[in-house]
Amino acid sequence: MIKTVTLLTRRADLSFEDFHRHWRDVHAPLVLALPGVRRYLQCRPLMTDGAEPAFDGIAEVYYDDRNSMQKAFDSPAYAELLADEPNFMGPTTKEAIFLTVEEDELL
């Protein structure tokens, strides 16, 4: 299983609530429209002690293999997804994307 992990930051002019509303209601359907996506998770930070979190969310997108991932990246749906990103993401999000492979599960 291949997974992209993205540490998202919001646009400076958006509230935390507006960022998450757009991410959930507008952007998530675009991710789910990509061919080959096996699983999609949106993780939101817990607010603790009034401290501002370092990131506004973590996205995990799962693919069966590299070919499935490449099929998604080559699709017209991916261009639509990229076009939506400036509508809610801050510029540092592009610097915080990781490609991982799941190999070991340790309990």
Image (spheres, rainbow, N blue to C red):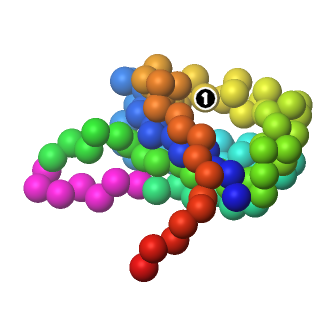
Query: Could you tell me which residue is drawn at 54 percent across and 66 percent down?
Result: 104
Query: Could you tell me which residue is drawn at 42 percent across and 79 percent down?
Result: 107
Q: Is residue 15 left or right of residue 58?
A: left
Picture coordinates of residue 60 (x, y %)? 57, 52
Picture coordinates of residue 79 (x, y %)? 79, 27
Q: What's the magenta region?
A: 44-50
- At label 1, the amino acid type is Glu
Query: Is residue 40 something one can see in this rendering?
Result: yes
Q: Mark 1 = which residue?
A: 85
Q: Is residue 55 left or right of residue 99?
A: left
Mark 1 Cα-neighbour bin, 10 Å: few <14, some 14–19, many ≥20: some
Q: Is residue 52 left or right of residue 104?
A: left
Picture coordinates of residue 62 (x, y %)? 68, 55
In this picture, is 17 found above or below 102? above
Query: Could you tell me which residue is drawn at 26 percent across and 44 percent down?
Result: 53
Furthest residue in direction bottom, as rendered = 107
Q: Main secondary structure of the magenta part?
A: loop
